[in-house]
Image: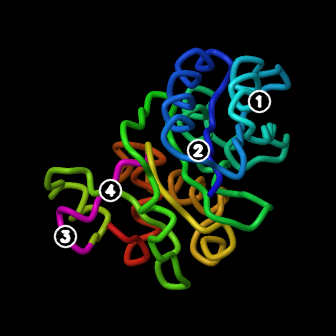
Amino acid sequence: MHLLLALDKSFEHLAAVAVTSFLLHSSFESLVIVSPESEKFEKLEYIAYEFDVPFVHQMLEETSALYRLPKDVQPYFYCIEALNQVIPGRYLYIDADTLCVADLHLLTKLELNFNTPFAACSHGRPMPDRSLILNLESPFHYFNAGIFLFDSELLKKYLSPSMVVDFYLKNQCLCRFREQCSINALLRGHVQF
């Protein structure tokens, strides 16, 4: 399993705490950082080195779908570019403010398959407005896009950065939580909760 974050340089301090908390509790094949900047993430690279985890920095391409969005909305969509991994495998995506407090070995056993290549936690409370607007199975079938697990190869059938941006641009009035609503709608029926 790879640990995956999408952020800009201004979130590196916060991400350093998050990454450390995850590496203290589990081992990962690599630490992958997706960012729009060519700047180095020295703190994150050093932490990966100290935990003997390969560090991979993927910069967003100039042709990235998120650049079709207004500039003030683009940072919310960095996570969709993180979904576009070329190395096959299982990825745990986390926001820079997510902490790990226990071992994650059960995630390695969670089956991701052709029909459900994505796993996430329910928002924790019913979201009837999101359920109705996005045509979800129930008010509990809305997830927070701040932490999720996915299989990079299997997910490609259901989701791409371009699909998420297109959905958002065509349905902005439905997407109160921008990228999160877009991903929830596009993955309807293909998420393990």
Q: Circle 1: is it few (<14), some (14-19), or many (20+) Cα within 10 Å?
A: few
The x and y percentages for residue 87 are: 79, 62
Q: CA distance from mark 1 to mark 3?
A: 43 Å
Q: Is residue 89 left or right of residue 73?
A: right
Report the residue marked by disc 3: 138
Quarter occupied by residue 89: bottom right
Amino acid under label 4? Answer: Cys
The image shows residue 70 at horizontal and vertical percentages of 61, 33
Q: Give the mark, 2 or 4, whose residue is nearer the N terminus.
A: 2
Residue bearing mark 4:
121
Badge 1 element: helix
**Along the horizontal axis of the image, is 64 left or right of 11?**
right
Classify 10 Å Cα crowding around label 4: few (below 14), some (14-19), many (20 and above): some
Label 2 belongs to which residue?
79
Magenta-tinted stretch: 137-145
How far apart are the alpha carbons under marks 3 and 4?
14 Å
Q: Are marks 2 and 4 in contact (CB under 8 Å)?
A: no
> How far is the residue under mark 4 from the one under mark 1?
30 Å
Secondary structure under the numbered disc 3 in the rendered image: loop
- Which image quarter: residue 1? bottom right
